[in-house]
Amino acid sequence: MTAQILDGELVAAAVKAELAERVAVLAERGVVPGLGTLLVGDDAPSAKYVAMKHREVADAGWVSRDVRLGNDATAADVAAAIETLNADASIHAYIVQYPFPAGLDYESLVIGVDPAKDADGLHPFNLGRLVMGAAAPVACTPAGIMRLLQHYDVPIAGAHVVIVGRGLTIGRPLANLVTLKHGGNAAVTVLHTGVAELAPWCRQADILVEAAGAPDLITPEMVRPGAAVVAAGVKFVDGKLRSDVAAGVEEVAGWLSPKVGGVGPMTRAMLMANTVDAVERSVHGSTP
């Protein structure tokens, strides 16, 4: 068996084409979407990721604002930058890039983000609405994973989804998203690297999502033949990008997202989708 590739570049292009039509309608009203980012510290992968986001925004002809603070930034500095982005009328949505340098508490500071401008869907208000099943910005990587699976007709409703990773940006919101009656309606098991025996759980999965950031954690023997495997967890090791999914899984899985060109493009596309949603809410005077 050779897995069908879940091509994130292809699906992201389709998402952007849909967004372009909505942005054209906004342009008729003189409205141009604005996306901002706040990067604290000098984490190289974060800086690269933010740069990619701004290139895509520039290519789309949107307004962008790139706010950066050094490793010596205090909590007060971060809070002030967040307030500046909240007050900037040209910026409809923005992200506070995760992770922060040691000594700064991401979860306590992100509370200062205006929930209506939360492009990442990680504000407690929006996470709470996700748990309730109410409309709100959804965390970009989980939203992208769902769109990717849906595009390739991977059965989700009634499936057993196993998520390896319980982080704020992927594991926790995705676990809620896949259980929602509309769009998900799956059973879910959340694992992490502290679980002594991952393999028996992973082999039960119809859809296996790797989001632990532990290279080569998932081997072919841990995958049920024909399962969909989403490689969302990556980590830089000695300057090289490594995936949670080891070589050989493609010979067992029915579907597989690649390390490059899989989940990453979908995350950025859904960030743009959240921004357009925010613009439309501001135009129509609605709330998340």
Image (tube, rainbow, N blue to C red):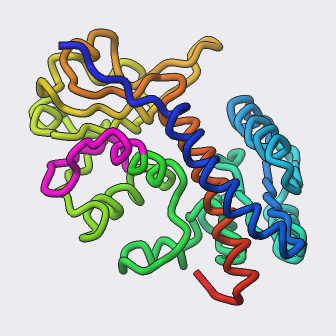
Q: Is residue 109 left or right of residue 199?
A: right
Q: Considering depth in this image, is 151 or 70 the residue closer to the camera? A: 151
Q: Quadrant of residue 256?
A: top left
- Most foreground residue, 114 or 53: 53
Residue 76 in sight in this render = no
Q: Nearer the viewer, residue 69 or 259?
A: 259
What residue span does the magenta drawing correspond to? Answer: 148-166
Query: Would you identify the image quadrant in which residue 85 lies?
Result: bottom right
- Of the 4 image quadrants, the one containing the C terminus is bottom right
Q: With 157 as the anchor, is 46 left or right in this view?
A: right
Q: Which residue lies at the image location 29% right of the left edge and 69% below the top edge?
A: 182
The image quarter in which residue 131 lies: bottom left
Q: Residue at x 73, y 72 (%)?
A: 279
Residue in the picture at 74% in, 81% down: 282
Q: Position of residue 26 (x, y in %)?
A: 78, 70
Residue found at x 79% / y 36%? 51
x%, y% of residue 126? 53, 74
Q: Is residue 158 magenta?
A: yes
Q: Position of residue 118 (x, y in %)?
A: 66, 68
Apparent side of residue 128 relative to residue 102 in the rendered image (left or right): left
Residue 13 visible? The answer is yes
